[in-house]
Image (cartoon, grey):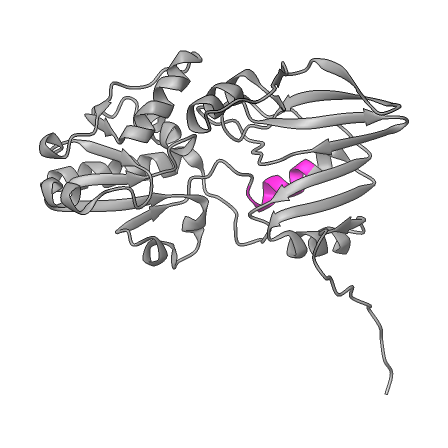
């Protein structure tokens, strides 16, 4: 298994068990042999979560960049994304539609802080929903300097301690205790609060923190009172920007709106396809009557 040091630490905690690991350092070109072939692989920071990596592969006279989940613009937790040119590009396209253009992140963080402040002023407990690895830590960092007392659900706390072990700093926080949560902000994964914990918390106000908040239906689907568009994935413009930086001869789009984004690239005269999907290629014709 090829992975970075941070990913190895996260995996040992979340998926315990025996595995053969080959730790890769960012930017280090490593030679591998498979059968009679030799290729080189370089791990590049993907900017998604701490330790996330893109794979730049050199084989014979061809190069390939495989992104996995990525985010071009620098966030508060992950390493800054680094790209390179490649002949072939396999890219994640979670938010591959034009409607997923995210607002300024500092503005969104201020909106989250205002939500918490207003909720506390009303005597309720603000509960922010974010995945335990990556998103919750980004939420916590975003609350720095706001003066809140913050409680972390068990899994969130575990992943946050691993980030601290890797050198990431956070505002003060404490373990989640529903009996003593009044006047504090709670960060928890979606749907993790148990019935008894909700009863002990009393009146709460919940918010989903996700890129899907760009959809007006998000808070209804997530069952929350509010939704804030903060994502650790590239938005539509970020996807286009990556293609421009890599300048590939061919693009393979995977995950999310893969077919739609591949069509967008073809409309820009790029060779793009979404593997595994049946795609109807358009044929522009002018018919005179």
Q: Quadrant of residue 71?
A: top right
Residue range corresponding to the magenta coloring: 235-242
Q: In front here: 74 or 207? A: 207
Residue beneath the point at 36% across and 57% down: 221
Q: Quadrant of the N terminus?
A: top right
Q: Quadrant of residue 122?
A: top left
Q: In front here: 141 or 223? A: 223
Q: In front here: 66 or 34? A: 34
Residue beneath the point at 66% across and 43% down: 240
Residue 267 x, y percent position in the rendering: 75, 56
- 155 falls in the magenta region: no
Residue 249 x, y percent position in the rendering: 83, 40
Q: Is residue 164 above or below residue 56?
A: above
Residue 213 shown left or right of residue 193 in the figure: right
Residue 182 shown left or right of residue 70 in the figure: left
Q: In front here: 158 or 12? A: 12
Residue 25 x, y percent position in the rendering: 63, 14
The answer to whether residue 103 shows anywhere in this view is: yes
Residue 204 shown left or right of residue 35 in the figure: left
Main SS class of the magenta portion in the image: helix
């Amino acid at each position: 298994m090829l992975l970075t040091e941070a990913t190895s630490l996260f995996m040992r905690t979340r998926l315990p068990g025996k595995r053969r690991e080959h730790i890769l350092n960012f930017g280090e070109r490593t030679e591998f042999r498979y059968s009679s072939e030799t290729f080189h692989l370089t791990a590049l920071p993907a900017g998604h979560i701490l330790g996330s990596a893109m794979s730049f592969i050199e084989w014979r006279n061809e190069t390939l960049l495989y992104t996995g989940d990525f985010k071009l613009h620098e966030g508060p937790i992950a390493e800054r994304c680094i790209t390179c040119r490649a002949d072939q590009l396999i890219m994640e396209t979670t938010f591959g539609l034009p409607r997923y253009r995210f607002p300024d992140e500092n503005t969104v963080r201020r909106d989250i802080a205002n939500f918490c402040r207003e909720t506390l002023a009303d005597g309720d407990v603000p509960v922010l929903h974010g995945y335990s690895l990556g998103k919750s830590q980004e939420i916590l960092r975003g609350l720095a300097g706001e003066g809140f007392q913050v409680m972390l659900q068990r899994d969130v706390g575990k992943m946050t301690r691993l980030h601290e072990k890797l050198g990431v700093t956070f505002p003060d926080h404490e373990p989640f205790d529903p009996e003593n949560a009044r006047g504090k902000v709670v960060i928890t994964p979606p749907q993790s609060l148990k019935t008894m914990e909700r009863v002990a918390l009393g009146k709460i106000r919940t918010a989903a923190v996700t890129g899907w908040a760009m959809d007006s239906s998000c808070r209804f689907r997530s069952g929350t009172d509010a939704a804030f568009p903060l994502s650790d994935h590239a938005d539509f413009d970020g996807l286009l920007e990556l293609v421009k930086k890599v300048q590939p001869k061919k693009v393979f789009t995977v995950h999310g709106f893969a077919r739609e984004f591949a069509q967008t690239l073809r409309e820009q005269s790029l060779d793009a396809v979404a593997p595994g999907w049946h795609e109807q290629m358009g044929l522009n014709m002018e018919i005179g009557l």
